[in-house]
């Protein structure tokens, strides 16, 4: 799954714009990934500040 | 604030405030909700608009139209400069002031505006949109309306809550970082665009001077170039560009953002719902310019909303007047630009260098933007026809 490093985030909304299941909630200076993430990673790719990261997979 | 309105507009950018202005001037009771603390801030935008589009709405006022420029420079990857002296000027806006002014106009026309109102859902009754759910300072409540206009920007969720897929495809998103810089090297009478795979893959770098020693500088790269985890971010590209061209620059503001450079959504209305601006993917797919397009869409949507209120008919069928008028005007132009975009941003650095060279060898004087498009696309005759049509 992916997570957002808020210290890097600019709250620009580009991750929200590409999110297929529409599960990123962005308020003025507050962002969270809601339930329903499909792990498609589009938000990881497009983030201008590389503020969205993938969790290491644990076996 | 009342419990019920004719029209609720989500988003206080130029699309939303223009829709509010025209809906209110047609007699509708309008409420506009902006999630941020301020209208017009932060400015996620390059702040450039074309003269003709702007003047359809307003006479440029130096309070917010801070620079007027006729000279455009297109800089090839090898540094060759193609200079265009265009008849139509480009205006550089101060969006903080511009957006405020648009909101004031809408308010004077009777629209109510509230900031820090976060819309977190849409009320749907009998498959018809009938209001919004929102949050204000931690308090959650609903406001009813017959029409909701989603002008909630690139990060739009309003359409998706109503079953319209507005999420942007990777191939259609430009990921951007921009800065307002102060530098003695800025030439305030020229707008510059830099192209090249090493400068801005699938996009460009812009330098839009806002006055003496001040410019909005940014880079946009296409989403398809972002999949490699080792990739450079737009921020890396911007820093490299500034180090090379404006090493003395102070950065007064820096922002990230996304721009939909898409063909335009097929469906932008539903029962009780209209989408406007970036939320409807209405920016120009080649330039990413979206201010005037959003205002044009907002004007149509606002008028149609007022008409729907007069007739008390909020059905999709009634609201389809908006996409009809949009498709016949800017929508059709954007489709042509989208076809051109696919070729233009596919050019290799070698081709871009050759195109620039040929312009400078044959007709360096009196080049227009139209000449540039026609010349660059000459190996693609159907696109030349598109270019001739959009730059009549």
Image (tube, coloured by chain):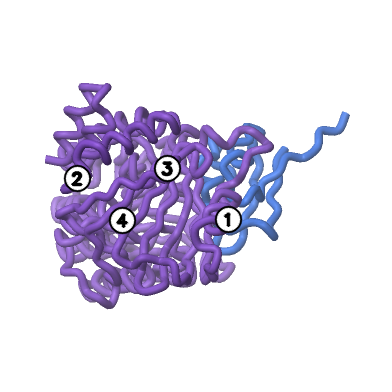
Chain colours: A blue, B purple
Element carrying mark 3: loop
In primary-sequence order, the first of circles 2 and 1 is: 1
Location of residue B331 (image quadrant): top left
Position in image of residue B321 (x %, y %): 17, 42
Mark 1 crowdedness (10 Å alpha carbons): few <14, some 14-19, many ≥20: some
Q: Residue at label 2? A: B367
Position in image of residue B38 (x %, y %): 44, 72
Q: In 3D space, how far apart are the residues under numbered discs 4 and 3 (Cα atoms)?
A: 23 Å
B258 shown above or below B331: below
In primary-sequence order, the first of circles 4 and 1 is: 1
Q: Which residue is at the front of the view, B178 or A4?
A: B178
Q: Residue at label 4? A: B291
* Labels 3, 1: one chain: yes
Asked if the residue at tag 1 contacts the one at tag 4, i.e. Cβ–Cβ closer than 8 Å, the answer is no
Q: Residue at label 1? A: B239
Q: In 3D space, how far apart are the residues under numbered discs 2 and 1 (Cα atoms)?
A: 31 Å
Location of residue B335 (image quadrant): top left
């Amino acid at each position: 799954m992916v997570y957002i490093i808020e210290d890097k985030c600019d709250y620009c909304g580009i991750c929200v714009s590409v999110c297929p299941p529409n599960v990123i909630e962005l308020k003025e200076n507050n962002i969270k990934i809601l339930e329903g993430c499909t792990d498609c990673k589009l938000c990881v790719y497009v983030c201008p500040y590389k503020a969205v990261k993938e969790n290491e997979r644990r076996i | 604030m009342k419990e019920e309105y004719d029209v609720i507009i989500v988003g206080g950018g130029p699309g939303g405030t223009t829709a509010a202005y025209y809906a209110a001037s047609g007699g509708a009771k309008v409420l506009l909700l902006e999630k941020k603390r301020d209208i017009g801030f932060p400015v996620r935008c390059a702040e450039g608009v074309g003269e003709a589009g702007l003047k359809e709405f307003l006479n440029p006022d130096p309070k917010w139209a801070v620079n007027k420029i006729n000279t455009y420079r297109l800089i090839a990857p090898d540094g060759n400069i193609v200079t265009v002296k265009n008849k139509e000027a480009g205006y550089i806006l101060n969006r903080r002031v511009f957006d405020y002014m648009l909101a004031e106009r809408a308010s004077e026309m009777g629209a109510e505006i509230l900031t820090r109102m976060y819309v977190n859902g849409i009320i749907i009754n009998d498959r018809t949109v009938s209001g919004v759910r929102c949050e204000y300072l931690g308090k959650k409540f609903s406001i009813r309306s017959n029409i909701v206009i989603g002008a909630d920007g690139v990060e739009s969720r309003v359409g998706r809550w109503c079953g319209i897929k507005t999420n942007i495809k990777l191939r259609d998103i430009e990921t951007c970082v921009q800065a307002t810089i102060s530098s003695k090297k800025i030439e305030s009478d020229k707008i510059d665009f830099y192209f090249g795979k090493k400068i801005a893959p699938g996009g460009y770098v812009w330098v839009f001077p806002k006055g003496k020693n001040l410019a909005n500088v940014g880079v946009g790269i296409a989403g398809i170039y972002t999949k490699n985890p080792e990739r450079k971010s737009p921020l890396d590209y911007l820093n490299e560009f500034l180090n090379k061209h404006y090493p003395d620059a102070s950065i007064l503001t820096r922002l990230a953002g996304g721009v939909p450079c898409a063909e335009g959504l097929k469906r932008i209305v539903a029962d009780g719902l209209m989408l406007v601006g970036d939320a409807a993917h209405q920016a120009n797919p080649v330039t990413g310019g979206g201010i005037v397009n959003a205002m044009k869409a907002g004007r149509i949507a606002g008028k149609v909303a007022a008409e729907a209120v007069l007739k008390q008919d909020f059905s999709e069928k009634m609201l389809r007047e908006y996409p009809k008028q949009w498709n016949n005007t800017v929508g059709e132009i954007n489709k042509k630009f989208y076809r051109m975009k696919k070729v233009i941003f596919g050019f290799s650095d070698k081709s871009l260098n050759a195109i620039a060279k040929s312009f400078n060898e044959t007709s360096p004087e009196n080049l227009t933007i139209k000449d540039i498009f026609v010349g660059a696309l000459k190996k693609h005759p159907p696109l030349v026809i598109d270019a001739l049509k959009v730059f009549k």
